[in-house]
Image (cartoon, grey):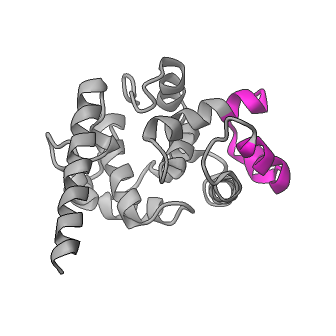
Amino acid sequence: MPKKLCLAQNPEADRLLTESPLALLIGMVLDQQIPLEWAFTGPLTLTQRLGRDLDAADLANRDPDELAKLFATPPALHRFPGSMAGRVQDMCRQIVEQYDGDPAQVWADVKDGKELLKRIQALPGFGVQKAKIFVALLGKQYGVRPKGWREAAGDFGADGSYKSIADIRDQASLDKVRAFKKQMKAEAKAKAATT
């Protein structure tokens, strides 16, 4: 376990992300097309709306329409609350079916980085890039470091980089990650303009 994650930039939300593997996975699923602080505060907001700790079996078995309402209640957990509620519920169902409802089992006892990447990428809501970033986050901040984890994480696993949420430990590192992403977008835009 990390000493303290700083992804939401909110002490209570970050404490939940640090202590709850399910909260961390849910935040990661939500981390697309919205500011990362909003995504990683989502698990705390969901916990408050549920009135109980996050539990994969509970979320997996909830009525999909009721769960979507929890996601859509202002302030919404995501700009696409219905589809994200479905994605989170699908991920929880898979955790229940394949890992006995224990989200930490997704990365427990993996033999190497390739297996870790494969397990994470198999979860609903995790494409190749997001899975690599999550492998990097687990290795850099969660202490999950099977043989070959850096290679499995690709560029996101590089030591001393500021390319993704895996590298955010405080406001200064968040600023560096944002600067990197801004630079990448500018380069991609310039490249597209020349082709």
x then y, percent, for residue 24:
51, 40
- State whether the magenta stretch is mostly helix, strand or loop: helix
Q: Quadrant of residue 73?
A: top right
Which of the pair 125/105 is nearer the observer?
125
Instruction: Classify residue 31 as left or right of residue 85.
Output: left
Q: Is residue 148 visible?
A: no
Residue that appears at 70% across and 39% down: 55
Which of the pair 35/138 is nearer the observer?
35
Residue 151, above or below 38: below
Q: Which residues are magenta?
A: 46-72
User: For the N terminus, which image quadrant?
Assistant: top left
x then y, percent, for residue 143:
32, 37
Residue that appears at 22% across and 65% down: 188
x then y, percent, for residue 45:
65, 31
| Furthest residue in direction bottom, as rendered | 195
User: For the C terminus, which image quadrant?
Assistant: bottom left
Q: Is residue 108 magenta?
A: no
Which of the pair 30/75 is nearer the observer?
75
Residue 105, above or below 93: above
